[in-house]
Image: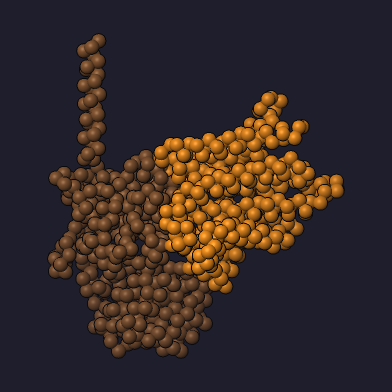
């Protein structure tokens, strides 16, 4: 009896030792994510999950895990479907933190859903990483555990304006015509401020309502102001209408950049040659030239798969023959940022990792990464895409571009005669 | 029936809410799940006051929650500069939420309640979209940009209290609204209002012939239900999530959810919205965990089967089964 009691005690002590050993050096780092796999953000959510899985796989296999002290710890990705609904987001964050004991929460897609989860993450004092909420307002609320990877809305057109300022310094007449929506307004607020800094003259500024079916009155007024370049749009439908009606009214400008519409393949399919030379900003596009060599040249540390490796892993996990878009890239880059943050902090403690992320600067296939004090992304540059001969060419920034910009773009009369946008 | 016996059905209702609260409070990781379940129960309970009792389907119901959210948001963002008001700003917010949803329900009711059945449903279907376009188009209350006011709440209450409000106290308030809506439902059921509403639900013309002022009772139920929705919007949306974007708070999806919850549990019953809210919320939650991305595909036929098997809802079926037993007075 005595012997068996001693035996039980030894086994119990051994188990306890095992538990405490496991507690001292965890065998995995868990990323939790209330993903949008259904509902209105399902497409963006599917891309994000594919991007995260691809980068988690790269970290675990190629990179060998996350270096914490003298141990390499693998990443684990735990996600549920939030249905793109705010009520579900908070309940799933609660589960991820309490039941799954995740080390970090990746926010769901969109600014609204990101905002919904932020107070819960704050109250649990867990790091909350935002790859899908572009609103600058998120970072004016005083949240302490939030860090952004997606570029903020106010920076969407900075690259476009920088590029025009560089290649045509005398073209200063700028027109802003955009959808009356929270997102478009914020984008244009940033564009307006940056344009003023660069010496552009805003000769026209007006909004149009959501779901607009006729932009003729607005565009007629815009034509009178004789702008050199036009920044506009809001969503795909109105962006397409904008371009089509500019062609109908023969409003020729040197550059036209439309948010959320011009970068999509469907935009060219709908407008064919009328889309030639039209530009659009994007967080990332497949084909960007970010590489380890570029990182070295700019003095930034490089981490992560190459673009082609990322694409191969992305296709492996999505089991679909589709290209990763910016939703996938920014979610993937967020995994890499977190890995570097943990390594820099030497710990998985959210407060320490948040602090480390505040001091972090690096480059990956997604581009640069750096946040300001509030956690807002300031190191990532948007890329500008232009339709040239039916293909999307990345024309800005220098570090990412795959071709020169066609400036000025062909007139609509030329485009009607099938003249393509070919850079001189 | 003795005066006290009238309120016996509240025992299982309040016991269920108390159990949910205690479970959430004591079991690690349950709070946010319970908060979601409470939201659905409160939504169903508030919606049931009108739809369940009258049989009228109000597709614009979410608009009352939307204006309630705006009531609280406006109070916080516009009064934050008056520091001396402190937490009274929230009290004013609740008052504003109730006043705005009541006013909207009076405006909608004045027109739509003259119609019946499908015509009423069609008349209300555009209320939420109409109100959303009014806010966006006329650019009132920040128009399409909406309002984000976490920082304002921090300023009014202090960071820690504001965080506790968003993640804890707002849920307690939702629980209180669910209980209040249940209590109001029972009071109506056990009074002249309830009898009149039951009569008009069964046959409106016959009720009229019997001398019942059906318009008056419909308006009472409509305004009560709208007022509860306004409170729910102010709490579950504005306080739990300190932001308001027009497309989110006027999303018809929430009305559809309210209809499903009431139908699942049993329209016009007291316990129906509680049971419907729990079945709906728990199924959604666990399907999203075990079958992420496929839950809606599975959920739709499940709801269809439940409604075909129990056309009176789960509580309606239980009511029939407990008839003549000691449980009868608790299950209504």
Please state which of residues A380 and B129 is positioned toward the viewer in this rendering: A380
| Residue found at x 43% / y 44% | B288
Chain B: colour as depicted: orange
Q: Is residue B130 left or right of residue A214?
A: right
Please state which of residues B105 and A293 is positioned toward the viewer in this rendering: B105
Which of the chains is brown?
A
Quadrant, the N terminus of chain A: top left
| Residue found at x 37% / y 41% | A98
Residue B35 drawn at (x, y percent):
49, 45
Q: Is residue A368 visible to the viewer in this orientation of the structure?
A: yes
Residue B276 drawn at (x, y percent):
57, 40
Q: Quadrant of residue A147?
A: bottom left
Residue A349 drawn at (x, y percent):
27, 48
Q: Is residue B304 visible to the viewer in this orientation of the structure?
A: no
Residue B250 drawn at (x, y percent):
55, 59
Spot the residue most to the front.
B84
Asked which colour scheme the image uses, the reply is by chain
| Residue found at x 41% / y 71% | A186
Quadrant, the C terminus of chain A: bottom left
| Residue found at x 52% / y 82% | A217
**A219, above or below B198, in the image:** below
Query: How many discs mark residues in the rendered view?
Result: 0
**B283, above or below A157, in the image:** above
Spot the residue most to the top.
A1
**A400, above or below A35, in the image:** below
**B124, above or below A72, in the image:** below
């Amino acid at each position: 009896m005595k012997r068996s009691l001693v035996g039980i005690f030894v086994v119990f002590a051994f188990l306890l030792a095992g538990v405490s050993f496991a507690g001292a050096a965890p065998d995995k780092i868990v990323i939790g994510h209330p993903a949008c796999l259904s509902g209105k953000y399902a497409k963006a959510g599917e891309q994000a999950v594919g991007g995260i899985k691809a980068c988690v796989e790269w970290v675990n296999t190629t990179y060998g895990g996350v270096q914490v002290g003298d141990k390499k710890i693998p990443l684990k990705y735990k996600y549920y479907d939030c249905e793109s609904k705010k009520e579900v987001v908070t309940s799933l964050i609660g589960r991820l933190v309490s039941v799954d004991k995740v080390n970090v929460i990746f926010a769901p897609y969109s600014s609204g859903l990101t905002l919904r989860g932020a107070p819960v993450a704050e109250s649990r004092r867990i790091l909350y990483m935002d790859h899908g909420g572009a609103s600058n307002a998120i970072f004016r609320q005083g949240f302490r555990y939030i860090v952004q990877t997606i570029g903020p809305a106010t920076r969407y057109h900075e690259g476009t304006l920088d590029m025009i300022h560089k290649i045509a310094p005398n073209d200063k007449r700028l027109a802003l015509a955009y959808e009356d929506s929270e997102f478009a307004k914020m984008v244009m607020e940033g564009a307006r401020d940056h344009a003023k800094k660069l010496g552009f003259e805003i000769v026209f500024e007006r909004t149009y309502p959501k779901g607009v079916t006729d932009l003729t009155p607005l565009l007629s007024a815009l034509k009178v102001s004789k702008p050199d370049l036009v920044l506009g749009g809001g969503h795909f439908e109105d962006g397409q209408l904008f371009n089509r009606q500019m062609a109908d009214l023969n409003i020729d400008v040197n550059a036209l950049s439309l948010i959320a519409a011009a970068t999509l393949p469907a935009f060219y399919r709908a407008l064919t040659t009328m889309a030639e030379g039209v530009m659009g900003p994007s967080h990332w596009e497949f084909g960007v030239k970010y590489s380890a060599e570029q990182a070295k040249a700019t003095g930034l540390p490089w981490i992560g798969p190459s673009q082609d490796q990322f694409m191969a892993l992305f296709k492996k996990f999505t089991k679909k023959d589709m290209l990763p878009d910016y939703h996938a890239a920014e979610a993937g880059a967020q995994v890499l940022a977190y890995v570097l943050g943990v390594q820099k902090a030497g710990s998985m403690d959210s407060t320490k990792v948040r602090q480390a992320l505040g001091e972090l600067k690096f480059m990956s296939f997604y581009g640069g990464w750096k946040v300001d004090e509030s956690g807002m992304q300031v190191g990532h540059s948007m890329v500008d895409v232009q339709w040239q001969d039916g293909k999307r060419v990345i024309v800005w920034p220098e570090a990412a571009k795959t071709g020169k910009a066609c400036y000025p773009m062909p007139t609509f009369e030329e485009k009607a005669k099938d003249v393509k946008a070919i850079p001189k | 029936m003795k005066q006290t016996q009238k309120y016996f059905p509240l025992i299982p209702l309040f016991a269920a809410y108390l159990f949910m609260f205690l479970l959430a409070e004591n079991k690690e990781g349950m709070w946010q799940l319970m908060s979601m379940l409470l939201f659905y129960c409160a939504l169903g309970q508030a919606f049931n006051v009108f739809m369940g009792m009258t049989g009228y389907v109000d597709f614009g119901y979410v608009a009352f929650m939307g204006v309630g959210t705006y009531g609280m948001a406006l109070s916080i963002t516009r009064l934050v500069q008056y520091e001396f008001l402190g937490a009274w700003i929230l009290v004013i917010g609740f008052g504003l939420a109730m006043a705005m949803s009541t006013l909207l329900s009076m405006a909608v009711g004045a027109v739509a309640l003259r119609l019946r059945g499908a015509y009423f449903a069609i008349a209300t279907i555009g209320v939420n979209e109409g109100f959303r376009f009014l806010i966006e188009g006329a650019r009132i209350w920040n128009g399409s940009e909406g309002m984000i006011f976490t920082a304002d709440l921090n300023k009014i209450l202090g960071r820690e209290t504001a965080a506790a409000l968003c993640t804890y106290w707002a849920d307690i308030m939702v629980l209180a609204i669910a209980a209040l809506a249940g209590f109001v439902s029972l009071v109506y059921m056990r009074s002249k209002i309830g009898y009149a509403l039951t009569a008009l639900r069964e046959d409106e013309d016959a009720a009229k012939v019997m001398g019942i002022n059906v318009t008056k009772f419909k308006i009472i139920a409509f305004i009560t239900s709208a007022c509860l929705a306004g409170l729910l919007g102010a709490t579950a949306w504005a306080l739990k999530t300190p932001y308001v974007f027009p497309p989110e708070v006027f999303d018809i999806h929430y009305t559809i959810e309210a209809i499903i919850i009431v139908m699942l549990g049993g329209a016009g019953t007291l316990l129906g919205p509680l049971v419907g809210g729990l079945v709906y919320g728990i199924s959604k939650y666990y399907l999203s965990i075990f079958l992420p991305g496929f839950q809606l595909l599975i959920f739709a036929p499940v709801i269809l089967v439940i409604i075909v098997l129990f056309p009176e809802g789960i509580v309606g079926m239980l009511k029939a089964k407990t008839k003549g037993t000691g449980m009868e007075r608790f299950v209504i």
